[in-house]
Amino acid sequence: MTEMNRLQEFLDGGHVDAAVFALRPDYRALLLAVDGLVPGPSDQASDELLQAAETAAGELLSDRPVEQLPHVAAWREAYQGFGAKPSRTRNSLEALLRRAVSGLPRVNRLTDLYNAISVLHQIPLGGEDLTRYGGAPRLVRATGQEPFDTAAGGATVIEHPEPGEVVWCDDDGVTCRRWNWRQARRTQLREDTTSALFILDALGPITDEALHTAAEDLVARLTRLGPGVSVARRLITPGPTSTEGG
């Protein structure tokens, strides 16, 4: 099996539960499985991209509060739909925009890159180490029994989502709570990550064209990190899904 086929097979196993689409029929997930990445610590290129994102965020927020941005407002509404309080648990896009005022975090080359793309394109975007997945990614409404590994006081702890909470998960547990709020430690991107899964989340204010444009920007920047980068893609919608490789 070629590497491209392996990546596509992984994505083909991905699933968004009907209960999630019932909550938000306008939801779409664009998944990218990427191999051959050249990871590393934050560098000048990632810093410059984050600076551009910080500048863009400042311009966006110059005349209105973050919660009035259309895609942020849509995600706040979606969070309320499954019982989360958006003022306490903010979607990843809103969290980044609020941090951009004082400076976005510098984590590592891959994380810096996807955080910047998220802000620049106004789309929640998560990145995870594909090799640490146990089975395919699934977006479901939780039973409340699924394990979620996080940290408290410097120690690893296991938490559980609220029943009905929207979570990304695999066979080993929750990989991201509250749709796109907080990722598990298990699948975090690291400075030695060479295979990754990126998930771009979209609601109504974001068109399919804008979603694909954000993905193309991310892929173009990832491809510059090494000569052997392979990318498989899958768009999951309430209707027929599409797949493409690159």
Image (tube, helix red, strand yellow):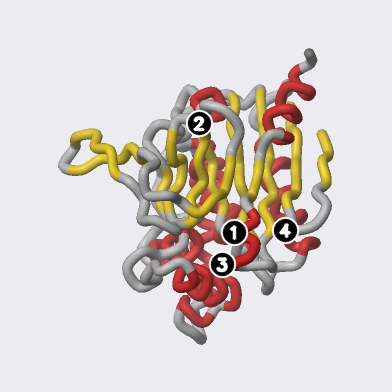
Q: CA distance from mark 4 to mark 2?
A: 28 Å
- For the view shown, which residue lies furthest in the bottom direction? 63
Residue that label 2 marks = 171
Q: Position of residue 200 (x, y in %)?
A: 63, 52
Query: Which residue is tagged 3?
Result: 56
Earlier-in-chain disc, 4 versus 1: 1
Circle 2 crowding by C-alpha within 10 Å: few under 14, some 14–19, many from 20: few
Quadrant for residue 188, please give it: top left
* Distance in Å between CA atoms under marks 1 and 2: 19 Å
The answer, for residue 33, to whether it is visible in the render is yes
Q: Earlier in the sequence, mark 1 or mark 3?
A: 1
Mark 3–mark 4 CB contact (< 8 Å) = no
* Sequence-wise first label, 3 or 4: 3
| Residue, far top | 1
Kind of residue indicated by mark 4: Leu
Q: Is residue 219 left or right of residue 56?
A: right
Per the image, the residue denoted by label 1 is 19
Residue type (three-letter) at the residue carrying disc 3: Ala
Place of residue 129 in the rendered image (x, y in percent of width and height, measured from the top left): 52, 30
Q: Is residue 41 visible?
A: no
* Circles 4 and 2 in contact, beta carbons < 8 Å: no
